Image: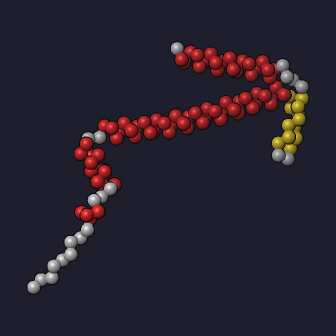
Amino acid sequence: MLQKIRWFLLITGVLVAVIIALQNQQPTPLTLLFTEVDMPLAMLLLATSAASFVLGALTTALMLKKSSAAKAQRLDAKNKKPEVRAMESMAKHPDPSASKLKPETPAS
């Protein structure tokens, strides 16, 4: 059901953007850095709408990728046996008293 709502909102948004763009046909000056171009307002509106959609989609994809990687890492840690977790913990935080070398006693 949620997927149908998403599609409905996406299609509605695209239709509204196209209708607004097509009703604004007057030429508009666009100054970008050192250039100035006259283009129809409709083209400018459609271009900015498309650019914002692409940036939003890329941002969402990156967030989902990071979230799924973190979830996989949590599941991996959860599924490990307790002995493996204990060994990893000991490797990360060694006991300082166990690592001290005992002084050698001189032979008599």
Q: Residue at x 72, y 18 (%)?
A: 15
> Picture coordinates of residue 32 (x, y %)?
82, 42
> What colour scheme was applied to this rendering of the protein?
secondary structure
Q: Residue at x 29, y 40 (%)?
A: 80
> Picture coordinates of residue 70 (x, y %)?
44, 39
| Viewer-nearest residue: 84 or 108 | 108
- Quarter of the image for residue 74 reads top left
Residue 50 lies, with reference to residue 84, above or below; the image says above
Residue lying furthest front: 97
Image quarter of the C terminus: bottom left
> Picture coordinates of residue 88 (x, y %)?
30, 50
19 left or right of 65 in image? right
Q: Residue at x 78, y 18 (%)?
A: 19
Residue 101 lies, with reference to residue 48, above or below; the image says below
Residue lying furthest left: 108
Q: Residue at x 61, y 32 (%)?
A: 57
Residue 49 lies, with reference to residue 13, above or below; the image says below
- Quarter of the image for residue 16 reads top right
> Picture coordinates of residue 40 (x, y %)?
86, 28
